[in-house]
Image: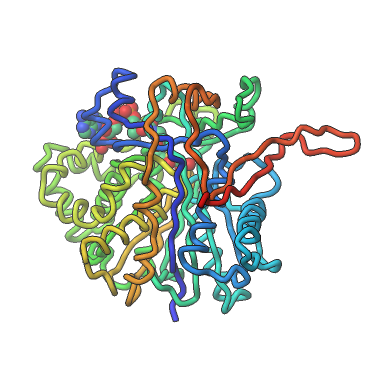
Amino acid sequence: MTPGISGFSLFVPPYRVQLEAWCDWNDQPWGKVRNVVGRSFRMRGPGQSVYTLAANAVWRLIRDYDIDPGQVGLLALGTESSSDNSAGAVIVKGMVNDALTAHGMPLLARDCEVPEFKQACLAGVYGIKAALRYLATDGVGRQAIVVSADIAEYARGGSGEPTQGAGAVAVLLESEARLLEVNLAGSGSDSDYRVADFRKPFARFRGQPPRDDGQMQDLPVFNGRYSTSCYIDATHHAMTAMLGKRPGNSLDYFNEVDRVFMHRPYHQMPATGWVMAYLFTLAADEESGRDQLRAHCADAGIDADLLLAEMCAPSPFHGNGADIGEIIGDVFPLSRRLRQHLRSTEVWNTLVSEKLGLGSDAMRDLGNLYTAALPAWLASGLQHALTEGLELAGQEWLALGYGSGDAAEALPMRVAEGWQAAAARINFETALHGPVDLTEAQYIALHEGRPGDLVPAPAEDQFVVDHLGTANGPDFYDQGIEYYRYVPLTA
Ligand SMILES: CC(C)(COP(=O)(O)OP(=O)(O)OC[C@H]1O[C@@H](n2cnc3c(N)ncnc32)[C@H](O)[C@@H]1OP(=O)(O)O)[C@@H](O)C(=O)NCCC(=O)NCCSC(=O)CC(=O)O
């Protein structure tokens, strides 16, 4: 019996921004955006919040996998978009129980834990690790659901604007995995506080104009190039920690692993992170690795000694104090040049295209789902393989999660025998059906929390925000609390 992942379910809002249109609206280069970012992203619309997205994904998971709600002993929420600073997954539980009641089904177990995890985009991976520990200890024989849900919104006019997104992925975990057996003992972790990459201090909410949807605009504080360097550094260290637990030469792993899935804030970032992990492993290998690195440098016209100094520095990030503002640029400039050179070599095909290709194209239509991006890509990969009739059983997969400037997790996985049955229940394709393409005016209005002239898509078999509480005492208080409603299917 190997614990791991047995099911996935996706929910995204219907409201879609086509990036080619967005480039027209904003005079941005579609060639670059198409190659680097993706094709489209979704936005939260009227009646939707991060909690309704999460509950919709969990509800679909329960239905699609015939889950007995009484068996679920842990329901975890991973998010960096929560708008309640006290309650978390229990809000999702409440909504799902309303739908279960409406369908005459048993409720989620009363003895179900309902934690929320927070560490930027890594929260869902922490939730998955916690769920596996639960199933191995006090939750033996039970099931766990981890739902990752986020609304990634960036300021209009900033470099992150095309990398927005909204959605949720619910993951079913069992002590005998039907899809992906997770080698928890073989996983690698990294964390290092970076101060100024990807923070969401409450101070941002001060003075925000009121929105029609009653929600806050949750724009991150980040620095673009520095953000890429943080991703590279954190994923590199998580990989090193994982590779340190494996017998044999670390370099061999880059040949042996069959498929790689990583946190994807935009299309190009995983390839960048993965190639950098490879280059760091070459640099750390004083035998053949460094020779290969020197050969690549010679081809690219880069001084290999300077590159090695850049890659082997104990920390490329100098200072975390008052001088932090001076180091927000690219801290791996030579490695960046070498990476760009490798794009036109065979190394790129074997290392990137073959290993990171599964399910990747469909992900170009999801934008950044923050915590849900990595589980969504795993789901997309499994569905892609099923559609193509690929045999995956026994394959070694790597799921590399990353969260904000500060932390990463490398989780080795193996595809379970008979994975096809559970993969056939993944709703990735159907979840993307029926998009509503936004006009520029509708996009701007939704970004500001106004419906504009948008006619909301009908909500069926899903949860919506019904209204916000307004009572501020003295007999009753519910100011700002979201009240939800389950909208059944119309016959
Ligand atoms: C991608 C961005 C960095 C884009 O910013 P810029 O446009 O200023 O970036 P840039 O000019 O450096 O270009 C980025 C890459 O595109 C390449 N590039 C440029 N023009 C190109 C073209 N026409 N075709 C192909 N590639 C092209 C560059 O060489 C570079 O690759 P190369 O780099 O190989 O040289 C942006 O999306 C951004 O600011 N994102 C928000 C921050 C973010 O997503 N952080 C990451 C994870 S945090 C997250 O997800 C949340 C969390 O964890 O909480």
Q: Quadrant of ligand 1?
A: top left
In-front residue for pair 9/351 = 9
Q: Which residue lies at the image location 63% right of the left edge and 75% below the top edge? A: 138
216 in relation to 148, above or below: above
Q: Which residue lies at the image location 15% right of the left edge and 40% below the top edge? A: 341
How did the renderer colour the structure?
Answer: rainbow
Q: Which residue lies at the image location 49% right of the left edge and 68% below the top edge? A: 173
Q: Which residue lies at the image location 43% right of the left edge and 60% below the top edge? A: 8
Q: Position of residue 163 (x, y in %)?
A: 38, 34
Q: Position of residue 300 (x, y in %)?
A: 12, 39
- Left or right: where 31 falls relative to 193: left
Q: Is residue 21 visible?
A: yes
Q: Is residue 227 visible?
A: no
| Residue 365 location, quadrant | top left
- Left or right: where 250 falls relative to 294: right
275 in relation to 470, above or below: below
